[in-house]
């Protein structure tokens, strides 16, 4: 891919070529919004007004191989460049779904009409590529200054249900307030026909880009729009916890606070999205297990009882087997790091815990997030230090020579019914720090008993 300076220069050249044909090229949408906010945005969108599609294509072909993105959409790209170049278009709703639109391109639509089809005022600003002049037909700069997410055209807005989630997503990303009139519109829109992948895409932006991810769910709650895609979260509202351990309040408050605390750690995760899903779902088991015992509120075994609920939640949104396995694994194990840290458990026990974890390091990070209350201030740091020290020991153990299947075969064993079990026994010896030669002897003795 071309670097930023090369891309910027090429966009300028394209704009000059368009200008020579009597047209204008504009930066549009989120690129303009983020530029005004001082944020980097690598997704560059250009809209070209005043030239026919065949003229625009001929211009673009001077700069590289042109790729058409949806013929009827009038969107082009140049291979090797991270820019989309579009002709203004109009849309006509034909059904309930996010994709149920007929699209018409119109290079002479005009700036105001082109901006009107966008969702929010802050996304409707356009900037002339050559002059830098900003066309702001709907007060986007003022709303940006005041931190307001406001729809443009109510009739157009309600035709696309995804815009409900986008409003919540932008609220979480920028800590903006959704305008009252936009909230009222969002309450009227049916989200049930949205494809799961589009819901997940907005959720991912909120969790991975949000300054305050909890606002995504708080805004949907205020819109009465949690039920459709996140019904399990509704069940957390008012679900009590022991105030001694959870002064933050009910399970909803705990989950929302954990989400926001996780922001400080998400860039350390290999895949931030799946990591951020863990604070969202880790306590869903409390829906089934919360009870009062001798005047105290408990949710015994919620980390295991909740697994079917977590699975149902995740499968509604995605079929990514690796993501689902990771979140389920982290949910099941999330109580154990702090338990073994409090008990100063043996190396053998912490090794077994880390061996069960899909990502031991990220499990430790989450155990820190789960103890966000000031009540745990000193303990949290002590536990983190203990767990990170033990993780280094685990890694060192795993780097040592160990008994393999080939070693067992070379020693005279034949793969058979008990072979996997014998290898499992050898692995337990490895976790216990038994040297390879001794572990092989013990594994063979175990095999003879079998």
Image: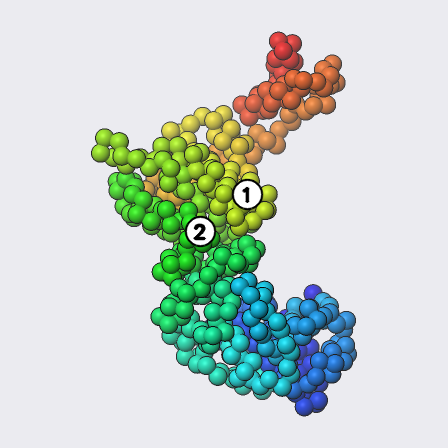
- In the rendered image, which quarter is residue 44 located in? bottom right
Determine the residue positioned at 42% across, 49% down.
231
Position of residue 345 measured from the top left corner of the image (x, y, whole percent): 42, 27
For this orientation, the residue located farthest to the left is 295
- Sequence-wise first label, 2 or 1: 2
171 to 153, vertically: above or below: above
User: Which quadrant would the C terminus be assigned to in this image?
Assistant: top right
Numbered mark located on residue 163 in the image: none
Secondary structure at badge 2 equals loop
Closer-to-camera residue (258/4): 258
Residue 343 vs residue 449: left or right? left
Numbered mark located on residue 324 in the image: 1
How many neighbours does mark 1 have within 10 angstroms: few (below 14), some (14-19), or many (20 or more)?
A: some
How many neighbours does mark 2 have within 10 angstroms: few (below 14), some (14-19), or many (20 or more)?
A: some
140 to 184, vertically: above or below: below
Position of residue 202 measured from the top left corner of the image (x, y, whole percent): 51, 59
30 to 284, vertically: above or below: below
Closer-to-camera residue (221/47): 221
Closer-to-camera residue (159/57): 159
Numbered mark located on residue 230 in the image: 2
Determine the residue positioned at 29% across, 43% down.
240
Q: Is residue 183 visible?
A: yes
Determine the residue positioned at 28% across, 39% down.
242
Q: Colour mode?
A: rainbow
Determine the residue positioned at 33% across, 37% down.
290
User: Which quadrant would the N terminus be assigned to in this image?
Assistant: bottom right
Secondary structure at badge 1 equals helix
Report if the CB atoms under discs 2 and 1 are less than 8 Å apart: no
Position of residue 148 measured from the top left corner of the image (x, y, whole percent): 40, 72
Q: Is residue 2 visible?
A: no
Q: What is the spatial separation of the Cα atoms under label 2 and label 1, in whole angstroms?
A: 16 Å
């Amino acid at each position: 891919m071309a670097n930023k300076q090369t891309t910027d220069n090429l966009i300028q050249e394209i704009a000059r070529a368009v200008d020579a044909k009597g047209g204008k090229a504009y930066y549009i949408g989120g690129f303009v919004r983020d530029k005004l906010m001082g944020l980097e945005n690598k997704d560059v969108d250009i809209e070209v007004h005043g030239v026919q599609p065949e003229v625009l294509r001929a211009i673009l072909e001077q700069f590289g191989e042109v790729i058409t993105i949806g013929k009827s959409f009038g969107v082009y790209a140049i291979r090797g460049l991270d820019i989309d170049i579009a002709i203004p278009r109009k849309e006509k709703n034909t059904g309930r779904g996010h994709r149920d639109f007929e699209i018409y391109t119109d290079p002479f639509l005009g700036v105001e009409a082109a901006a009107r089809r966008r969702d929010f005022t802050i996304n409707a600003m356009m900037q002339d590529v050559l002059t830098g002049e900003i066309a702001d037909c709907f007060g986007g700069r003022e709303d940006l200054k005041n931190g307001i997410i406001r729809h443009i055209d109510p009739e157009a807005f309600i035709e696309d249900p995804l815009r409900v989630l986008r409003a919540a997503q932008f609220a979480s990303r920028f800590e903006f307030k959704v305008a009252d009139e936009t909230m009222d519109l969002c309450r009227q829109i049916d989200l049930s026909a949205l494809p799961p992948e589009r819901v997940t895409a907005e959720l991912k932006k909120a969790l991975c880009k949000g300054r305050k991810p909890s606002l995504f769910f708080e805004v949907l709650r205020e819109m009465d729009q949690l039920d459709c895609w996140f019904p399990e979260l509704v069940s957390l509202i008012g679900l009590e916890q022991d105030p001694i351990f959870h002064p933050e309040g009910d399970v909803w408050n705990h989950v929302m606070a954990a989400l926001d605390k996780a922001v400080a750690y998400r860039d350390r995760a290999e895949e931030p999205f799946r990591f951020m899903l863990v604070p969202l779902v880790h306590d869903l088991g409390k829906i089934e297990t919360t009870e009062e015992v001798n005047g105290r509120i408990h949710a015994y075994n919620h980390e295991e009882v909740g697994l079917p609920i977590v699975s149902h939640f995740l499968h509604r949104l995605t079929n990514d087997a690796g993501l689902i396995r990771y979140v389920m694994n982290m949910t099941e194990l999330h109580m154990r790091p702090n338990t073994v840290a409090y008990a100063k458990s043996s190396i053998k026990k912490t090794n077994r815990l880390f061996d069960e974890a899909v990502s031991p390091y990220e499990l430790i990070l989450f155990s820190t997030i789960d103890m966000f209350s000031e009540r745990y201030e000193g303990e949290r740091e002590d536990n983190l230090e203990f767990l990170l020290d033990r993780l280094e020991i685990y890694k060192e153990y795993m780097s040592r020579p160990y008994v393999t299947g080939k070693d067992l075969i070379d020693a005279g064993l034949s793969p058979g019914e008990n072979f996997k079990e014998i290898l499992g026994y050898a692995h337990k010896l490895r976790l216990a720090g038994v040297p390879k030669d001794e572990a092989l002897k013990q594994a063979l003795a175990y095999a003879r008993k079998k």
